[in-house]
Amino acid sequence: MALEIFSRYELKYLIPFDMYVKLVEEMKPYMRYDKFGDEGKYNIISLYFDSPNYKIYYETRNKLYFRQKLRLRVYDKVTTQDDAFFEVKQKYKNVVNKRRTKITLQDAYRYLNQSDFSLPQDLSISNPQTMKEVHSFRSLYQLQPEVVVSYDRQAFHGIYDEDLRVTFDYNLLCRSQDLRIENGPFGTNFVNPELVIMEVKVTHSVPLWLTRLLSDYRCKKQSVSKFCTSIDLMAEERNGSASLAKPAVYTG
């Protein structure tokens, strides 16, 4: 959770919960628990932003070669006095670039509540350059808070492959009524509770042992956008039918 700038490949898989449990056991000789949380487990709550005409949504849904998102993220239970992270996540073809800056949640809300989209100069931030990028991106697209996405994660790092990270996300929920992320994880399931999103994150290539393991368990890569699927589901709940696109992940 400490890195502020990095670039990597991210491969996603949608797997049954019991397969997740088995894969964790198979991975243990090669991977260690993330240092955050108990056995690498923690909760993530993210506030995603979009423009009035859903430009970010459509860039992602249509899989443009270059697409980007803005989110405000917290980990586990927090108050407005605790740290949050503004993140700009960009994807060009298959490479993901992410820049983030730490900011108190109180200051994040103060910035977001500026009616003129101005950037206060007295914010408590860890990376002023990234904050300027956040502000430029938000101002250009007129981005406003759109949806809260939360989930539980178990994360692992490679023992012998230092650039390898594998995460498992479950209990995936979204909401659009209460956008205060300090209010915790609650909402509507946008992925079947019996399924888990597995992400393999590498700087260069997937190690051979993991490639074989994924093959043995017949894990197939699947495009899973937490952001787009949440937007679809919230539109469906508001209107009685999806106004943007049919939800593509729940598989209930």
Image (tube, grey):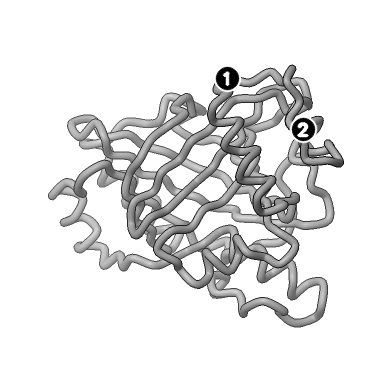
Q: Is residue 69 above or below residue 110?
A: below
Q: Name the residue located 54 percent from the left edge and 27 percent from the top edge.
A: 129
How far from the left and from the top, in percent, is residue 200?
Answer: 33, 49
User: 54 or 12, which is in the foreground?
Assistant: 54
Q: Residue at the bottom extreme?
A: 241
Q: Nearer the viewer, residue 207 or 131?
A: 131
Q: Residue furthest right?
A: 115
Q: Quadrant of residue 137?
A: top right
Q: Can residue 131 be seen in the rendering of this structure?
A: yes
Q: Nearer the viewer, residue 113 or 249?
A: 113
Give the residue at mark 2: 111
N-term-proximal mark, 2 vs 1? 2
How many labels, in total?
A: 2
Picture coordinates of residue 244, whole percent (x, y):
67, 76
Counting from the top left corner in percent of width and height, residue 222 is at 39, 67
Residue 197 location in percent, x, y?
A: 46, 57
Q: Amino acid at mark 2?
A: Tyr
Residue located beneath label 1 in the image: 126
